[in-house]
Amino acid sequence: MVRVQDLTKRFGKVTAVDHLTFDVEAGESVALWGENGAGKTTALRCLLGVIPFEGTVELGGYSSTNEGKAARHLMGFVPQEISFHDDMTVRETLIFYARLRKTTTETEHSAGLLQRLGLASYIDKEVRDLSGGMKQRLALMIALLSDPPLLILDEPTANLDVRAREGFLSLLNELKELGKTLIFSSHRLEEVAALAERVLVMEAGKLVSQCTPLELGNYLGNQTMLKLYLAGDEWIAPAVKALTGHGYLAEQNGTGIWVQVVPLEKAKPISLLTEAGIPVADFQLESS
Amino acid sequence: MDLENILTLTQKELRDARRNRWFILYTVAFAGLALALAWLALSGVGTYGLAGFGRTGASLINLVLLIVPLMGLTLGAMSLAGERERGTLLYLFTQPIAQIELLLGKFIGLALAMLLALLLGFGLSGLLIAWQGGATQAEDFLLMMLLAFILALVSLSLGFLISAAVGKSATAVGLALFLWLLLVFFGDLGLMGTAIVLKLDIDQLFTLALLNPLQLFKMAAILAIRSNLEVLGPAGTYAVRTYGSQLMVFLIAVLAVWALLPLAITHYLLGRRGVL
């Protein structure tokens, strides 16, 4: 779905993105992870073809530079800083962008999105009157109007409060389940853990590592330890085996098991063990 | 090129112009002053005879020379730079549209808005003259309106170029005002001064005048009303003698180049630097 080769972007003497190369398969969810200034947003802007760069970027086989329009037909974009024309209503905004995306707002798909995203009651409000969370939802709705297979999101929950963030992540997870390809930038481990299957770790514009969200937690030394107490000692060995088989760092500790977990997935080992028929009697969490 | 995208963006720009306080102010000022000039021209009927559209047209030349470039330059300058500053330009460019479609959509939208402003100003004064029975030289009056529209396109195009070249809208508007001052107030003085200091020949002076689109408009507008350029002195006489009946076509062609060239450079600049 996405092929990036030797992507380099320089602003004067500063190299914001340095020979970035990666592929994303259809249906995959990939996070560009890095601290502020790591080059994530610039890399996404290059993917979108809105700034000139060196190297090649292909979206669905279309070059984002030479065939930018065709490439952008395949994707929807949700920016970090949502900038709409404030004096337009939500309805006018949707109609305007729907026309540019060669679709209409008079479809069942569109009506469903409006309901699902909770925008129906805001339809005649001016965009300036929407909260940050609602603007984020409006941007997601515009991105999804033409039902593109690829979504590109720049720090999708950076401007949201905790409650809005959870709701938005749940929406994105639904889209992932529906088979959309997601590429998003983030510097939040929780967000990455909730959404990504693969993480591209960027530092100073360079891709320094590719890993799973779990491995990212280890890489960062962000260790949350889950201690599990099983229904009997005989379950300890099969439980350790089951967890390590799923990529967890797990080991026996006295009468229980220590498992290293990542944010937003702290309960996953319990689910895994339950599914494997291993009864979990109790648990406790410890962060370091 | 997708005409539907251009139309969508044109409509959006027209809608924005209706809500733009600067645009409304310029339009009202132009219409009010045009009407006042027409009334003044008509008030001289008793003394000088009924001159109809011709005398009003002559008065309107100076009004057009002042207001139309100011309007085009500032609206053009605010256009791309303002959207860039607000972040809406970046978001627009992430939609499946080509850069040229965005540029043309915005340009045509603002051009149509300016055409409406001109139609209002010229239309009101034209109606007043016709109502008072002075409907002579109506074709010349219409030709002058067309020339004013071409001047609007030129100034808008220059405004777009400024807008694409600088990052902030305040800088863009500042530059646009500076260029307006340069073209309006230092155009004649600059030409005269340069001709004296460099001892320019008459053909060189005429060539130099072509570098200022406002001078081009002035020549074409006077030619439309008086059929000669004697009022402009030796350079005007030289132009009429050299180009004869083709002078109007020549002047409009050079104005068209002035309208298209900055827009083409704007397109190149946007492609080169992106939307940031």
Image (cartoon, coloured by chain):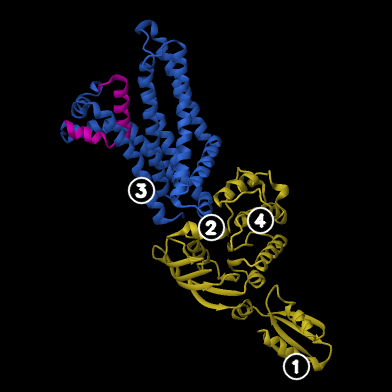
What residue is drawn where x is 25% and y is 29%?
B247
Q: For marks 4 and 1, give the CA distance.
A: 46 Å
In this structure image, what is the colour of chain B? blue
Chain at numbered mark 3: B
Q: Where is residue A2 in the image (x, y as percent from the top left)?
A: 52, 68
Q: Which of marks 4 and 2 is nearer the N terminus?
A: 2
Q: Are marks 3 and 1 on the same chain?
A: no
Q: The yellow chain is which one?
A: A
Q: Closer to the camera: disc 4 or disc 2?
A: 2
Reading the image, the residue beneath label 1 is A237
Chain at numbered mark 2: A
Q: Which mark is residue A185?
A: none
Label 2 is placed on what type of residue?
Answer: His
**Callout 1 environment at 10 Å: few (<14), some (14 to 19), or many (20+)?**
few
Q: In this view, does B89 lie above or below B252?
A: below
Q: Earlier in the sequence, mark 4 or mark 1?
A: 4
Q: Closer to the camera: disc 3 or disc 2?
A: 2
Relative to B125, is B48 on the left or the right? left
**Callout 2 environment at 10 Å: few (<14), some (14 to 19), or many (20+)?**
many
Q: For marks 4 and 2, give the CA distance.
A: 20 Å
Q: Closer to the camera: disc 2 or disc 1?
A: 2
